[in-house]
Image (cartoon, helix red, strand yellow):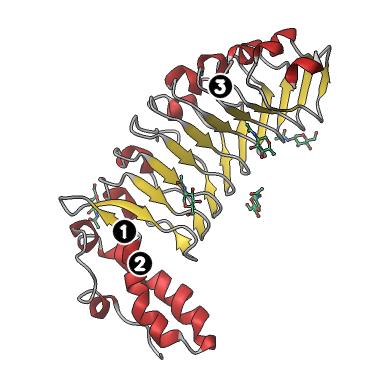
């Protein structure tokens, strides 16, 4: 193969397209070319399978694209597809998108401007394990449809404003672990959504005290914020979340005495607090 198939020559042989994609040629172009050139043709050329691979690749791509009854794209499931490049700003035009999974690719650059507000039917977003960077824009917000947000293992930085989380009334899982986020941990997230089950802030540059707030998450099972620069005491409203199974806060600068009311966490199975300056009169037996 001396040249890659062009967009126009590969389109007619594709399964029915969502009209979204036809009207967003740039987006299609990015997906098709990036995948064909980098994943298929380039990588497989050496193995002698390049021709077959290039022919079948477009079918593989459309496998990850779901459409609703009105032919609008409602899901993009492309984890581990070797995608490189940036997330096209035209993704914000896919306003029917409800599930986006681009995890474990080599995507770089920022999340497009106004992404979360534009995609106002988004339920699940997983862009974990890429090389994405930049800040969560001050003017962007999670919409009330969102239940799962996984931004983990990227190079994001900056603060997570409580205004970003405020509209997310149905948020269940929020994972920003393994980035470079800073500022204080947004404990206020529990004021907005009572459905939260899983919060992971580990491996970032969060600083300062953990403010009260997690006590308002009655369904919280896992709270993880290890490997940051958190200081001050563990806020005692955490000990009222009796559903909690895992409390993971190691390698911070937490200090003070661990409150005896930790025994109220009757479902706690994993407690990691090492690497802090905490003192304890922990009734260890009651944790086992
Ligand atoms: C995407 O939407 C914006 C406004 O919402 C519009 O100006 C732009 O033309 C759209 N782009 C495409 C490729 O449809
Ligand atoms: C995204 O896809 C990966 C790979 O299939 C999977 O492990 C992960 O659970 C998916 N993310 C979500 C939020 O479902
Ligand atoms: C954290 O992210 C880096 C790249 O940003 C990655 O190499 C590393 O495997 C990630 N660690 C975990 C525990 O996922
Ligand atoms: C966190 O603490 C370490 C060790 O004290 C320090 O080197 C680092 O600069 C701190 N990071 C932030 C974001 O404050
Ligand atoms: C406790 O930690 C272990 C090992 O890290 C893990 O396999 C298990 O799922 C955790 N349990 C809970 C309830 O989080």
Q: Which residue is mark 1?
A: 65
Name the quadrant containing residue 236: top right
Q: Which residue is mark 3?
A: 187
Q: Determine the secondary structure under disc 3.
A: loop
Q: Residues within 10 Å of mark 1 (few under 14, many from 20)?
A: some
Q: Identify the disc placed on residue 61.
A: 2
Residue 155 place in picture, x, y as percent: 59, 48
In the image, what residue occupies the spot 45% across and 54% down? 102
Q: Is residue 86 above or below residue 32?
A: above
Q: Is residue 288 above or below residue 200?
A: above
Mark nearest the camera among 3 and 2 is 2
Q: Earlier in the sequence, mark 1 or mark 3?
A: 1
Q: Determine the secondary structure under disc 2.
A: helix
Q: Is residue 214 above or below residue 128?
A: above
Q: Earlier in the sequence, mark 3 or mark 2?
A: 2
Name the quadrant containing residue 240: top right
Q: Is residue 27 left or right of residue 39?
A: left
Q: Is residue 213 above or below residue 84?
A: above
């Amino acid at each position: 193969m001396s040249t890659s198939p062009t967009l126009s020559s590969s389109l007619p042989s594709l399964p029915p397209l969502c009209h979204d994609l036809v009207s967003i040629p740039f987006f299609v172009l990015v997906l098709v070319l990036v995948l064909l050139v980098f994943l298929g043709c380039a990588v497989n050329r050496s193995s002698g399978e390049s021709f077959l691979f290039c022919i079948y690749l477009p079918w593989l791509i459309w496998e990850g694209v779901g459409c609703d009854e009105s032919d609008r794209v409602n899901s993009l499931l492309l984890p581990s597809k070797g995608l490189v490049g940036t997330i096209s700003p035209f993704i914000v035009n896919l306003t029917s998108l409800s599930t986006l999974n681009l995890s474990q690719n080599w995507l770089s650059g920022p999340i497009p401007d106004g992404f979360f507000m534009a995609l106002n039917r988004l339920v699940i977003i997983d862009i974990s394990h890429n090389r994405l960077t930049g800040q969560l824009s001050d003017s962007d917000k999670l919409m009330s449809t969102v239940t799962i947000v996984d931004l983990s293992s990227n190079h994001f930085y900056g603060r997570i404003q409580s205004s970003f989380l405020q509209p997310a009334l149905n948020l269940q899982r929020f994972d920003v672990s393994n980035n470079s986020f800073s500022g204080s941990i947004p404990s206020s997230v529990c004021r907005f959504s009572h459905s939260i089950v899983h919060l992971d802030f580990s491996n970032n540059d969060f600083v300062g005290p953990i403010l009260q707030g997690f006590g308002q998450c009655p369904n919280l099972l896992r709270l993880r914020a290890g490997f940051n620069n958190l200081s001050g005491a563990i806020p005692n409203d955490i000990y009222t979340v009796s559903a909690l199974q895992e409390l993971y806060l190691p390698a911070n600068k937490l200090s003070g005495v661990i409150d005896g009311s930790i025994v109220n966490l009757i479902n706690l199975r994993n407690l990691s607090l090492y690497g802090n300056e905490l003192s304890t009169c922990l009734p260890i037996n009651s944790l086992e």
